[in-house]
Amino acid sequence: MVSASWLLSGPVRDGVGFESFLRQTVQRSGQQATLTPRLGLEFEPIVDRLQARCGWYLEPSRLEQGSPRLHGTAGLDAGLLSFDAFGLLEPGTRWRIRAYLDGARQYLAWGASVGIWH
């Protein structure tokens, strides 16, 4: 599956950046609208067992002196065994593990989780 979108963020009156707020200075943020392009791909290398995702988006700067930065994202969902949590869930409930990554210049976010496969 391929998906593409544009995110429009409108202007904010009297907005300040978070770092500016912490430093107790005024650096205006969001004075004009910004448009963010996004592109994503999702596929199943192993049907009903492994899903993979990757994508890109351009994060515009909301500050006057900032510049936009390109993000790359990736994620995996792996199907695990069936387990009804000792009768608390429906019989045959399948579990999964998930991992994701989002990186850009001077930025890295990652995570992992365990959940139910839908």
Image (cartoon, rainbow, N blue to C red):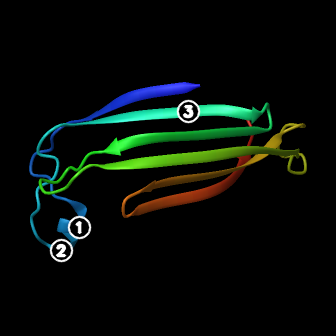
Q: Are marks 1 and 2 in contact (CB under 8 Å)?
A: yes
- Characterize the local packing of mark 3: few (<14), some (14-19) or many (20 or more) Cα atoms within 10 angstroms: some
Most foreground residue, 26 or 48: 48
- Characterize the local packing of mark 2: few (<14), some (14-19) or many (20 or more) Cα atoms within 10 angstroms: few
> Could you tell me residue 93's position as x and y percent?
84, 39
Give the residue pinned by disc 3.
41
Tell me where residue 2 sits by quadrant: top right
The three-letter code of the residue at mark 3 reads: Leu
**Residue located at (46% from left, 48% from top):** 72
Could you say which disc has been placed on residue 37 in the image? none
Give the residue pinned by disc 2.
23
Residue 38 against residue 14 in the figure, above or below: above
| 93 horizontally vs 101: left or right | right
The three-letter code of the residue at mark 1 reads: Glu
Q: CA distance from mark 1 to mark 2?
A: 6 Å
Tell me where residue 11 sits by quadrant: top left
Tell me where residue 89 sits by quadrant: top right
Q: Secondary structure at mark 3?
A: strand
> Could you tell me residue 31's position as x and y percent?
11, 45
